[in-house]
Amino acid sequence: MKVLLVEDDPKVASHIANGLLGEGHECITVGDGTSGYQQASSNELDAVILDVMLPELDGFSVLEKLREEGNTTPVLLLSAKSQVEDKVKGLRTGANDYLTKPFAFEELLARVEGLAGRNKEGEDKTLIKVGDLTLDLVNRKVLRGDQEIDLQSKEFQLLECLLRHKGKVVTRSMLLEQVWNYHFDPQTNVIDVHISRLRQKV
């Protein structure tokens, strides 16, 4: 999946870009609206992650220009604004989805992959299947066979992170950053508590 990230906050941009690269996706990163518009117009992309508050051109303006020119690349808007009117404005301007900061990377990844749809091999990127366990990333549901398992939001994100990295080493710091959105704290037992609950349910 080839993604354009338009984000002026270096820390947020680095967090997202590194996460996408770690999942095997290609990521073009720019920090202002003008560059974002130019990159979106000149590249064949699977999705655009577009921050609303940008220098030069804001995200709404970039999106409006792209849609006026017939560019139909799926766009996920990022914003610190959680008001309904801002979300409505973004969606009416042509955004396919809207995510409010702060967010967990795993949720952003699921939304972007959902927008991009199926990959080139035809694999459904909105589902993760391991044995008879299925994660529906769009509807945020977990099924064991035909039986739905009731998980809390963090439990779902934790399970998603573990299954995405099945067969790989998953560190505590990686789980803290991707699920809880903060850096490693050796004193916390939040991971142990959630994994214990997850094992009981799954």
Image (spheres, rainbow, N blue to C red):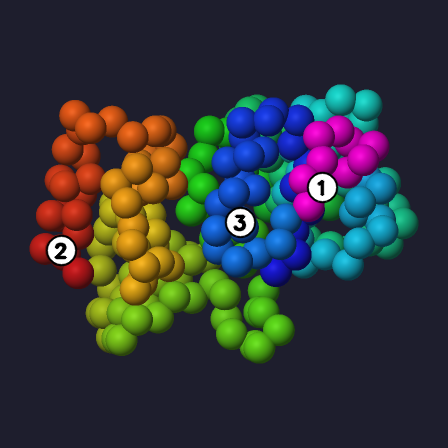
Residue 123 locus on image (x, y percent): 51, 74
Q: Over which residues does the magenta segment extend?
A: 28-36
Residues packed near mark 1 inside 10 Å, few (<14), some (14 to 19) or many (20 plus): few
Residue 124 locus on image (x, y percent): 50, 71
Which residue corresponds to mark 1?
Answer: 92
Residue depth check, mark 1 versus mark 3: number of the one nearer the observer: 3
Give the farthest residue toward the front: 169
Which residue corresponds to mark 2?
Answer: 199
Which residue is at 46% across, 29% downward? 102
Relative to 145, is 61 above or below?
A: above
Residues packed near mark 2 inside 10 Å, few (<14), some (14 to 19) or many (20 plus): few
Amino acid type, residue under disc 2 in the picture: Arg
Which residue is at 50% across, 36% downward? 15
Which SS class for mark 2?
helix
Report the label total.
Answer: 3
Residue depth check, mark 3 versus mark 2: number of the one nearer the observer: 3
Could you tell me how far apart the alpha carbons at marks 1 and 2 are, in whole angstroms?
42 Å
Mark nearer the N terminus (1 vs 2): 1
Q: Quadrant of the C terminus?
A: bottom left
Which SS class for mark 3?
helix
Q: Is residue 169 magenta?
A: no
Which residue is at 20% across, 28% downward? 186
Relative to 47, is 63 above or below?
A: above
Which residue corresponds to mark 3?
Answer: 20
Left or right, 150 with reference to 77: left
Q: Quadrant of the N terminus?
A: bottom right
